[in-house]
Amino acid sequence: MDRQNRTIVVFGATGRQGGAVARHLASEGWRVRGVSRNPAGARAQALRDVGVEMVQADMGDRSSLDRTLEGAYGVFSVQNYWMYGYGPEIRQGINVADAAHAAGIQHLVYSSVGGAERNTGVSHFESKWRIEQRIRELELPATIVRPVFFMENLLGWVHHDPENNLWTMRMPMPPDRPLQMIAVTDIGGFVALVFDDAGRFRGEALELAGDEVSMSQAARMISQHLGEPVEYAEMPMDEHRAQSPESADMFAWFIRAGYQADIAALRQMYPPLLTFGEWLDRVGFADRLRERQVDRSRA
């Protein structure tokens, strides 16, 4: 594969998934054109520092996409439901697919979500399924990756009670219900693998996970990593639904159905795939928790 003379356009380059993809591709010698609505920000500069060309475009503006894709070989497409909502996410994803088709892109990799094809009834899964359908209608040379729950998301569910000096992990999941998870960096690694072996992966859909643990297991592992007790407490679903109906729908689906990635097969494809314990060490999860504790105490 001629990487140095082929450009891959990475949408959402300053986000979590896009940033991981851009870094992996750049480290493996691809020419990477990162797309951001704010290419002058600190995250964009950090990508420039590793050789990524940064450009400005808006996935809601089709004309800006046509300019951005000129001369490109491949495209990585990802949208943010939580920032824009159901309808705008679909429009953005379809705009990227249509622009890729018009530009004659030779390989589109679209990041959907695990279970998108299984009629989940969860809005931010169904929106991605709509985008997948459009990619197929266009008969694009494409690969769909469907990541599961991000390990990074757990940072927001672990809290410290300074009065009692207690750590608690509280989520709307039964303590012993397993949940498949993936480290965001591994999404970037898989996407780089897919671009590098295009003939093998075009036309495929891959549900991506790196580990499967229950929340009580996760709390014990975080406790070991932190060196302090972390108690798991199941949050009532009605309480969480009052906070976020969409997130509650997702957790309800986790409980009744859940992800179905073949983790053993994925690890054969991509041996660096991180387990949850390896990820805790890799990202310095304990340090990040303590930094957040200090930040809150100063607020």
Image (tube, grey):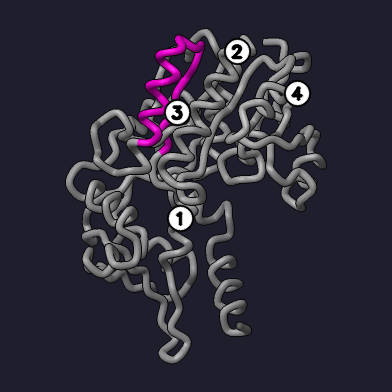
Reply yes or no: does residue 135 show up in magenta.
Answer: yes
Q: Does residue 72 appear to the left or right of 135 in the view shown?
A: right
Residue 134, relative to residue 172: is it above or below?
above
Q: Does residue 295 appear to the left or right of 181 in the view shown?
A: right
- Looking at the rendered structure, which numbered label has been put on residue 153? 1
In space, the residues marked 1 and 3 are separated at their CA atoms by 19 Å
Q: Badges 1 and 4: C-beta atoms under 8 Å apart?
A: no
Residue bearing mark 3: 145
Q: Which element is circle 1 on?
A: helix
In space, the residues marked 1 and 2 are separated at their CA atoms by 36 Å
- Amino acid found under the numbered disc labelled 3: Val
Q: Position of residue 106 (x, y in %)?
A: 60, 10
Residue ID at (40%, 13%)? 137
* Residue 210 visible to an observer of this rendering: no
Mark 1 vs mark 2: give the one in front.
2
Residue ID at (52%, 43%)? 184
Residue bearing mark 2: 102
Q: Earlier in the sequence, mark 1 or mark 4?
A: 4
Residue bearing mark 4: 31
Is the residue marked by circle 2 packed among few (<14), some (14-19), or many (20+) residues within 10 Å? few
Q: Which element is circle 4 on?
A: strand
Mark 2 vs mark 3: give the one in front.
2
Q: In the rendered structure, which segment of residues is drawn in magenta?
A: 127-147
Q: Earlier in the sequence, mark 2 or mark 4?
A: 4
Q: Badges 2 and 3: C-beta atoms under 8 Å apart?
A: no
